[in-house]
Amino acid sequence: MSTPNHITHLIRIDHLCKDWCSKHSRSCAYFSSLLNILTQRKDTSNFLFSSNNANSSKNLSCTNFIPSSSHKNLPFALQPQSLSLLIYKQSHEIEEILTAIHSTLEEFEEIINLMNGILNQSNKLVNPNQVFLSTNTSSSSPESPKNTNSISSTPPTTPTKSSKKKKSKQSPKKSKSTPPKKQIINLFDNFDNPVDIADIPIITSNYYIVRIVEMYEKELCYKKNLIFGGCLKIDHNDEENGINNIKLISERWAVQPYLLFEVEEEIFDRIKIWKRVKEFEAMK
C-alpha cells in the first residue's frame, strides 16, 4: 500500500527533527570541549607566567652574570618552550571548535530550508482542494442556462403563479448541490468513527508542519544571536571572563526555549498509530 503524500511529509519532518537533535547534541559537546580547552589554556598560561617571573627574580638577585640553569632542571614538558608550544596547540584547537560551531549553524540552516520545502509541498496539497471547489461551482453554473433554455422553450400553458412556485422550488435544490460539504469534512479530524482516530487528514498534517517550521526558525534565530550577537567573545587578556561568557552561552544553547517537544511527540505517535492501523487493515 502506497503512503499518501501528506503522511510522507510528516515522516520527513520527523526525520529532520531527529537530525536537528543529533546535530544539537554534537554542538553541545563542542561547547563542553571548548570550555575544557579554555580552562586548560588558562592554567598553562598562568603557570608559564609564574615560572617566567620566578626565573627573572632569580636572575636579578644573582651578582654574577652567569646564566641560570633553572630551566634545565625542569622536565621538558614544564619548560617555557614546551609550555608556549602547548598554548599554541590549545589555541589552534579552540579555533577548530569555533569553526565547527559555525558549520553547525550552517547545517541547521540546511534543515530549515528542507523543512520549508516540505511546507510548500504541503500547502500545494491544501490549495488544490480550494481550486477544486471553485471548479465545481463553475461546472455547475453552465447547467443553469440549460435549465433556463428548457423552460423558455416550453409553451406557457401553466399560469404565472405556478411557474414562480416551480422556480422557487428549484432554487433551493441548486443551493444544496453547490457546496461540496463532504470534501471539506474529509480534510478535518472526525472522531465519530474509531478508525478516523488513526487517520491524519491533510489539514492536520499541514498544521503540524507549520508549527514545526515556525518553532525551528525561531530557534535558529535565537542561536544566531547567541553566536553573532557579541556574546561569544574570548578575551586573551581576561580569560576568566571569557570562560564565564562561554558557560552562559552553552547553557542557553542547550536549553532550546523555542522548541515544543510535545508537538514532535504527538506527530511521532500519530504516525506510529497510522502505520499500525494500516498494517492491520492489510492483514484482513
Image (tube, helix red, strand yellow):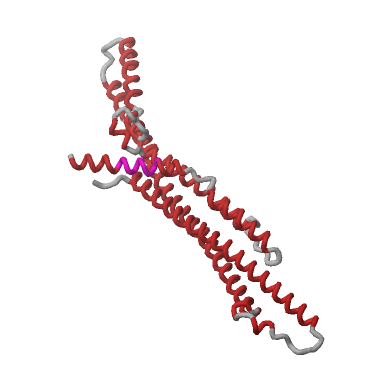
- Picture layout, residue 232 above or below residue 255: below
Residue drawn at x 53%, y 52% is: 254
Which sits in the foreground, 175 or 25? 25
- Picture layout, residue 269 above or below residue 77: above
Residue 127 seen anywhere in this rendered image of the structure: no
Q: Is residue 57 magenta?
A: no
State which quadrant residue 46 falls in.
Answer: bottom right
Magenta segment boundaries in residue numbering: 266-274
Label count reads: 0
Q: Please indicate whether residue 46 sits to the left or right of residue 218 in the image.
A: right
- Picture layout, residue 152 above or below residue 122: above
State which quadrant residue 281 falls in.
Answer: top left
Q: What secondary structure predominates along the stretch shown in magenta?
A: helix
Q: Position of residue 144 (x, y in %)?
A: 33, 27
Which sits in the foreground, 206 or 208? 208
Q: Please indicate whether residue 79 sits to the left or right of residue 189 in the image.
A: right
Residue drawn at x 66%, y 71% is: 45
For the C terminus, the image quarter is top left
Q: Position of residue 166 (x, y in %)?
A: 31, 15
Q: Position of residue 200 (x, y in %)?
A: 34, 38
Residue 200 seen anywhere in this rendered image of the structure: yes
State which quadrant residue 38 falls in.
Answer: bottom right
